[in-house]
Image (cartoon, rainbow, N blue to C red):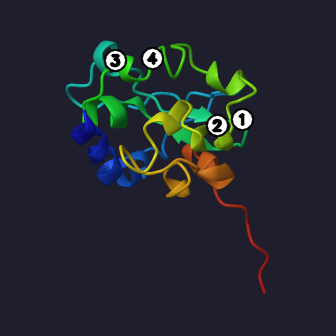
């Protein structure tokens, strides 16, 4: 199992950010962008939803993809569900303790993203935190016009 988590550390940055900026964002907590065509061999019953999940609490613009963790890294659904995360999207971010401090203490994503199984949750921030600009790119929005000098 540790070998699978080490793969996450090696590939997560490029896999999470590559190719996910063409999705449309749905409104509400744990917004789920509209799914783009899943890769060949992707079975949502085995690997989880193809569309990435965007969390908006406690901060806006945090992305999670099941594909990176299941299909690419070989983790099973029960590695996270239901002990770390409830199966329903949005349930975690509705909890008062869904904070970075909780992750640093080993809860939620921090159970694996601790620096030994996978990159620590207090490092490589932009792997998951795509921010408001990243969300705009995912929804097809463009950069705000900058005034000419």
Mark before the other along the chain sequence, 3 or 2: 3
Q: In this view, does 43 lie above or below 146?
A: above
Element under disc 3? helix
Residue 2 position in % (x across, y down): 26, 38
Q: Mark 2 points at which residue?
A: 102
Query: Based on the displayed image, in which of its 4 quarters is residue 112 positioned?
Result: top left
Q: Name the residue under label 3.
A: 44
Camera-near label (4 vs 3) is: 4
In the image, 85 versus 46, the foreground residue is: 85
Residue shown at 31% from the left, 29% from the top: 70
Element under disc 4? loop
How far apart are the alpha carbons under marks 4 and 2? 17 Å
Q: What is the crowding at mark 2: few (fewer than 14 residues within 10 Å), some, or many (at least 20)?
A: some
Residue 73 position in % (x across, y down): 27, 36
Q: Residue 81 carries which label?
A: 4
Q: Which mark is residue 57?
A: 1
Question: Relative to 109, is 135 on the left or the right?
Answer: right
Q: Is residue 53 visible?
A: no
Asked whether disc 4 touches disc 3, contact meaning CB atoms under 8 Å apart, the reply is no
Q: What is the crowding at mark 3: few (fewer than 14 residues within 10 Å), some, or many (at least 20)?
A: some
Camera-near label (2 vs 1) is: 2
């Amino acid at each position: 199992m540790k070998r699978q988590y080490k793969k996450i550390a090696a590939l997560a940055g490029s896999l999470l950010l590559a190719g996910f900026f063409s999705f449309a964002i749905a409104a509400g907590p744990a917004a789920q962008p509209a799914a783009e065509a899943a890769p060949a061999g992707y079975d949502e019953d085995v690997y989880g939803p193809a569309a990435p999940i965007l969390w908006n609490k406690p901060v806006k613009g945090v992305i999670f993809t099941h594909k990176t963790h299941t299909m690419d890294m070989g983790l099973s659904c029960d590695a996270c569900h239901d002990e770390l995360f409830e199966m329903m999207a949005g349930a975690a971010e509705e909890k008062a303790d869904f904070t970075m401090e909780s992750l640093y203490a080993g809860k939620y994503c921090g159970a694996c993203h601790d620096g030994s199984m996978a990159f620590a949750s207090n490092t490589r921030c932009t792997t998951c935190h795509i921010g408001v600009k990243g969300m705009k790119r995912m929804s097809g929005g463009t950069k705000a016009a900058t005034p000419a000098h």
